[in-house]
Image (spheres, rainbow, N blue to C red):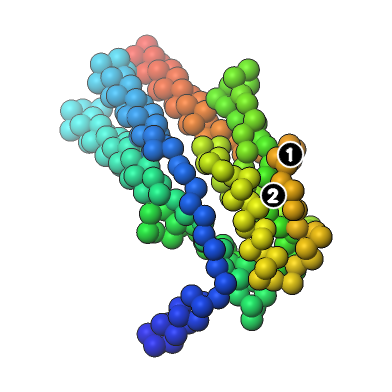
Amino acid sequence: MNESDDSSSELTESFPSTEISIGTDKNYGLIYGMLFLFFWIIINILLIFLIPLPFSFPERALLLFVINIFLMGLCIFCWKVGFLRRKETLIFTIHPFKNQLIYERFWSNIRTIEKKYQLGEIVGFDVYQKMGGWVKWRSEFHEELVLKFKADPPKYLTEEWQEQDIVEKTKELNQFLVSNTKLDEELVPEKIEPKIYKDKSKRDNKILSIIIIGIIVVVILIIIGYFLSNP
């Protein structure tokens, strides 16, 4: 079994492949970690000093312990993710026998994504502009690498903090496709001009969503505490 896996791995490594390094904001994980740390402190203040709970001391202590373990785990997880994403790499491999493009994403040395696409469904790589920002009036367009398909919506491969030389890297990826596949060279974008792509499935700003959810949770806790203290 191991011999089969080793031979398969060696065979895959012999296929045409290319990789690009996409820079990631080193503060990515720190931002999320500090956000959860903020809610951690707020919830502790509410539960210890402001919201009277109808529990005895052992039950109250157990509740606080569970909440603290949960939020501490979220903080550590976010900081760990941020540490791993300091070095993020995309690897594209062409499987000539299966006529597939294999897409892999690595955080440091850990593979987090592996997807396979049929070459016959692919048009090529392109750069799209999308609106990003915490609030609408401070939002601005940023460029993202996408993989375009003939029928399906484009697959976004980078995020707003990963814009270093994105146009040049897109040209290199298209050249890789043309050189190693039978894709129609006329269909593959030769001149990369970032364009605005409007779709109905826009990704929500994750940080803003977490803030809104956190505020809602805090408000609910305050309301519950008020009614419990004023029966």
- 151 lies above or below 35: below
Mark number for residue 126?
Answer: 2
Query: Residue 96 at x, y = what percent?
Result: 64, 78
Determine which residue is flagged by label 1.
195
Query: Residue 129 at x, y = what percent?
Result: 68, 37
- 189 lies above or below 98: above
Apparent side of residue 155 relative to residue 90 in the rendered image (left or right): right
Q: Quadrant of the C terminus?
A: top left
The image quadrant that residue 139 belongs to is: top right
Query: Residue 95 at x, y = what percent?
Result: 60, 75
Apparent side of residue 37 relative to residue 112 in the rendered image (left or right): left
Crowding near pointer 1: few (<14 within 10 Å), some, many (20+)?
A: few
Asked which secondary structure carries label 1, the reply is strand
Apparent side of residue 215 relative to residue 187 in the rendered image (left or right): left
Give the amino acid type for the residue marked by disc 1 in the picture: Lys
Q: Residue at x 67, y 68 (%)?
A: 179
Quick check: can you spot residue 228?
Answer: no
3D distance between C-alphas at marks 1 and 2: 9 Å
- Relative depth, front residue between 128 and 191: 191
The image quadrant that residue 202 belongs to is: top right
- Relative depth, front residue between 79 and 144: 144
- 118 lies above or below 98: above
Q: Residue at x 47, y 26 (%)?
A: 211
- 58 lies above or below 216: below
